[in-house]
Amino acid sequence: MRDQIMSEFLKSLATPPVGSAVPVGGTVAALALAQAAALLARTGDGADGGWMHGLRLAEQDAFAVRTSDLDAWRPSSDVITSAASLLAVAERRLAEGAAPLDVAAAAEAVRSAVVIARVAIESRTGPVPALGVDELVSRAERITAAVRSGLTNQLVG
């Protein structure tokens, strides 16, 4: 996955599975997290290396699902855990006035990642304990709302 061309990866996502369905939602969640980290890294210090962490989580998820690992939910849980630190970077970068569109895009990628990760966990284990997903979603939405309203130096509460 790490060295796969994006078009090849997307084609593999679009190809219907043969035999039993292999869920890839957790992998997509981790890749969204990696994209968010990359966007934040380009706005300044604070998220360097985060994109590689997201990529590692995507690879772990893909491997765990292919091998029917009983702990296949763990990479998705790590996506949710990692999301909080990325949102903190996004909030700080937004307050500093850094590239509002990139910060909002990163926040939305994080929001998407945590929602998908929650569903990936629930589909594998049933209802999940409180992982703080709703709070993370709210934080991401506040960042996006601040950018949309032009309040790039403060977050609306």
Image (cartoon, rainbow, N blue to C red):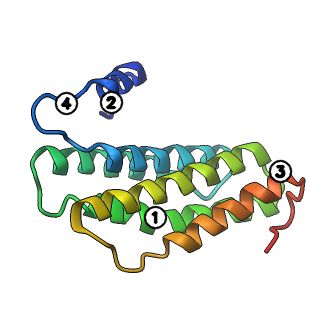
Which residue, given by chain and number where applicable, does mark 2 sit on?
Answer: 13
Residue at which label 3 appears: 148
Q: Residues within 10 Å of mark 3 (few under 14, many from 20)?
A: few
Query: Residue 34, relative to residue 125: is it above or below?
Result: above
Residue name at image x 13 percent, y 28 percent? 18
Residue 40: x and y in percent read: 63, 50
Nearer the observer: mark 3 or 4; the answer is 4
Q: What kind of element bears circle 2? A: helix
Identity of the amino acid at label 2?
Leu
* Picture disc at residue 82: 1
Q: Quadrant of the C terminus?
A: bottom right
Find the distance from the CA under tag 1 to the CA under tag 2.
Answer: 24 Å
Residue 93 in view of the camera:
no
Is 70 or 93 nearer to us in this picture? Answer: 70
- Position of 40 with respect to 53 (left or right) is right
Locate the N terminus and report the quarter of the image it occupies: top left
Foreground: disc 1 or disc 3: 3
